[in-house]
Every structure is written in C-alpha cells, then in structure tokens.
Image (cartoon, helix red, strand yellow):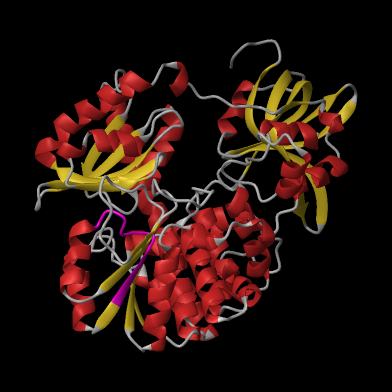
Amino acid sequence: MASRLLVNRGITTPEEAHRFLHPRYDDLPDPLLLPDADAAVERIERAIRQKERIFIHGDYDVDGVTSAALWMRLLGKLGADVMVHVPHRRRDGYDMKTEFVQHAKAEGAKVILTCDCGIQRCDEVEEAREAGIDVIITDHHEPGPTLPRAIAVVNPHRADSAYPFLELSGVGVAFRLGEALCQRMGFSVDHYRRAYSDLAAVGTVADMMVLRDDNRVLVKFGLEALAETRKPGLQALMKSAGLLDKTLDADSVGYRIGPRLNAIGRVDDAKIALDLLLTKDIKEAEALAERLETANVDRRQEEDRILREAMEMLAKGDYSDSYCIVLAGENWNSGVVGIVAGRIKERTGRPTILLSLDPETGTAGGSARSIGPFNVKEALDSCSNYLVEYGGHAQAAGMRLSTENLPSFVEAVNQLAREQLTEADMEPCFECEVEIEPTQVTPALLKELCLFEPWGRGNHRPLFVSRNIRLSDIRRMGKESQHLKLRGQYDGLYVPDSVAWNVGDYADHLHVGDHVDLCYKPQFNTWNGNTSIQFLIEDIRPSDADEW
C-alpha cells in the first residue's frame, strides 16, 4: 500500500521515499539560497547592533499575522528596537500603503521589514527610500514585471531564485530567513527552530500551502512544537478550539486554529490576533482567545448570509454560459467573500469571484477561488487594465476595481476561462487512489498510512473505493439530522461505520438491503475513550448504476 501511494505522489526512488516518510531539518536547503537573503540578514543585523528602529509590516490573514509574530518575537530576543503593524482589512486594505510609510518615518524607523506582502509595492518602496528608510521585503506571492527597488527582495518565486522549493508560505520565508539571521549572529539554530516552528506550521497550513518538501518538514516539526508550546496565546487558542490534550494534525490547524485566527481580521481587527500570539500573560491570552471565538461565530453567520444571497442570485440569473462565476452584492463583508467564493466553487465546479460593492466609492473589492486548470492570478494579469489593484496565487486571489469596469471585467475573465477550460474540467470528480475490499481496512493499514502525515494540499488523505456493500442500517444524525450514518456488510462480514457530513437527505434515497459503492477516507475515530475504524464518505452510489 505504501509503495502505491508513494508512486502516486511522484516518489519513485528509495532516497525520495526515505526523505518523504522521515522528514528532517537536515534535508532543508541552505536558507541563503533565497534571493537577497544575505543582504537582508546583513541589514537586519546592522540595525540590531546600531539600535536602529525596525518597523514590521505584516498582513491580516493567518500567514501574515504568524509571520509578524515570528519576527517580533525573534527580533525582540535579539535585542532589536522593533515595532509592528498589521493592516485593518477594511480601513487599510491589503499590503503596504503610503500611509504606513509616512507612519514609519514619523516613528523614526530606519528599516521596514515586510512579511507576506510587499512584492508589488514599487511606489511605496520609492517613498521609503526618499524618506531614508531601507526596505526588506519577505513575501511569497507572485512578483510583477518589475521588482521593487528594496535593499532586499526575499521571495522564492523570483525568476533568479536559486532556492529549490518555490512553495514556501509567507511565514515559511520568514522562518528560513530567521534561521540565516541566527546563524550569522551566532545563535543556536536548533533552539530557534524549537521556539518558532509552531508559528511556521500554523501559517503554512492555514495558507493552504503544498505539504511537500520544505513545508512537510516545517509542518511535521511545527505540529510537535505546537503540542508543547509555551506561548500563552497558542495555549489559550487551542483550549478555545477544544484541542488541549488532543493529538494535533494539520486538520487541527486548518479547521480549528486557522479559522479562529483568520476570523478576527475578517470581521474586526487582525491586531487582536497578533496581540494574542505576542502576549506573555495567560489571562490576557484567554480574554483575547474569547474575542477570537466570538468573531469566529460572527464570521460563520455572515458567511451563511452571503452564501444564501449569492445562491439566490445564481438561481435567478442565467449563468449557464459562465465558465467563471462573478457575483457582486452590497453589504457583503469583503473579509468573508473569499470563503463564500470557495464554497460556491465547490458546489458548481467553476472558478468563482465574489465582490463587495461600495456605492460611496464606486468600487468593488473581493476575492477569487479557482479550480486546478485555471490560474486565476494569470487571468487577473490579463485583465489588469480593468483593475485598480490585485494579487494572489494560482488558486486564490484578491482584487479591487471600479464598478464601471465590472461588466467588461466579467466578460474578459469569462472569455479567458472559456478558452482554457472544458466542460470536463468543471465536472465534480473524485480521484481515488485505492480500490479495496472494506474488510481489508485494518488498524495495521491505518498505522501504515500515518507515515504519510501531515496530510494536506499536495499530499491529500487517500480516497479508497469499496464496492457492493450491502446496507444494514441507515440513519440521520446531528442536532438537525443533517448528517448520514451507514452500517453495512461485505461478504457476510461487518463493514466499519460510515459517516457523511451535511448530506442527511441521502437517507431518503437509500434502503436497507441496497448494495452501494463507497468512496471514502478511512480513519481512526475515538469516542468516549474507545477507538475504532470509521469511513468518512466522500461519495456514494448504487452498485448497479453508473451515476446517482
């Protein structure tokens, strides 16, 4: 089984298999291979020794906040005179702006250090230069055609980068540059890694980075550090998320820790999340974690409202020819529309852009979520003449444009999507790795699968298919009967309990005695102190049918 899964992930030699199954810090490349890393480290060290003020500029998402927290904690330990700013999503907008440069000048900063942003802020870097401030950019977003004239632009996506792994998160870039700084200043790199890998893991997973190579190393050891963290903010956050004394995995971060840190920046001020990661007082940490919990509830309610309104738009309009769905509405929280775009993309199988209209400014701002074959960042590059500003990755991006340009933008992005996508690209599809008899899924097999953790993008939990299972029990579960639970038999033997989330209505289509094929993820389930195997259903169909 392990060999098959390794080959499916493009791992074909014993050396590659060993590195994948047994990640080590020693496998990481030299951080000084990052472009301009040496210049960045030299300038930061000089600022520390000369007591020059360093002003950190982060971002309002988890990647940006963990990056800013890492730099604040590290530079503080190294004796730097350091300040920090993370923008307010609605008040300040994304990335470093003129107002921040002016603020840094007023505060006497000699160095601006960006994290998870800055790669396209050419004008602002020039303003800083004229003000006598050196700028160091650390970022992982795609560069534009012209790099800012900063002292250092540390980004693995630069065309001239010698660093072999492109997919570092913003906090991943910060973490590796921090290693190089510790090396230069004679501090223990091992101690540094133990101290800050928890932050690196949280930001990397929350930003949905590929969990291969460098990221696999950072997240594996970061999760171990997170389980033992002494940072009061992370302790309080895990308590609030119900994770204390639980085995932590990437899903714990992706579905419980990350959303809480993200939520506050979506509906309030990301500085609250940063304060949580920086505080040394447990009482303050618990109070801040409670604010994040409240914000997360508010975020979910806002998300549900916007999704409901957006789905009503889809139902009333004619989007049959839309290869890229673009929806715009007033009173849509710009910090939440990206999540809703992702949910609509999952339902429709099409790239989706949701925009929040602002009648006062005559602008629309929002987020895009895309499907594999459609690079939304490149699409926005091609439509840039309609946009005021934009940035992002292949599968997720943000943008702002004049409402006057909205119809032209919609037509242009759809034309690009029609040229690049086929109907088959937009059909829901599950890529199953293993067809297996359900009774062959044993504790020993699941323990073998544990070697592949941490799971995540680029290393998804494998989907199994088991056929011709005879149903013996069908029931709804959950407070609103929204979930489905199945029991069945195969070849006279009982099959592990199978559950499917948010598809309770499927119970109306199933009957005891039916034979079905299941597509599922096998996992251990612990309840009331008892551990058993459980199948997490992704899809189900009658055994004698080609489709539902």
Give the total of numbered labels.
0
For residue 195, side relative to residue 116 (left or right): right
Relative height, residue 190 to residue 535 (above, below): below
Magenta span has 80? Answer: no
Relative height, residue 346 to residue 228 (above, below): above
Magenta span has 116? Answer: yes
Question: Where is residue 285 shown, x and y percent of the image?
Answer: 50, 79
Work out which quarter of the rendered image holds the C terminus and state it. top right
Residue under the image location 58 percent in, 41 percent down: 458
Question: Where is residue 311 shown, x and y percent of the image?
Answer: 34, 34
Relative height, residue 57 to residue 487 (above, below): below
Work out which quarter of the rendered image holds the N terminus and state it. top right
Question: Where is residue 306 shown, x and y percent of the image?
Answer: 32, 44
Q: Which residues are magenta?
A: 111-121
Residue under the image location 66 percent in, 61 percent down: 25
Q: What is the quadrant of residue 159 in the picture?
A: top left
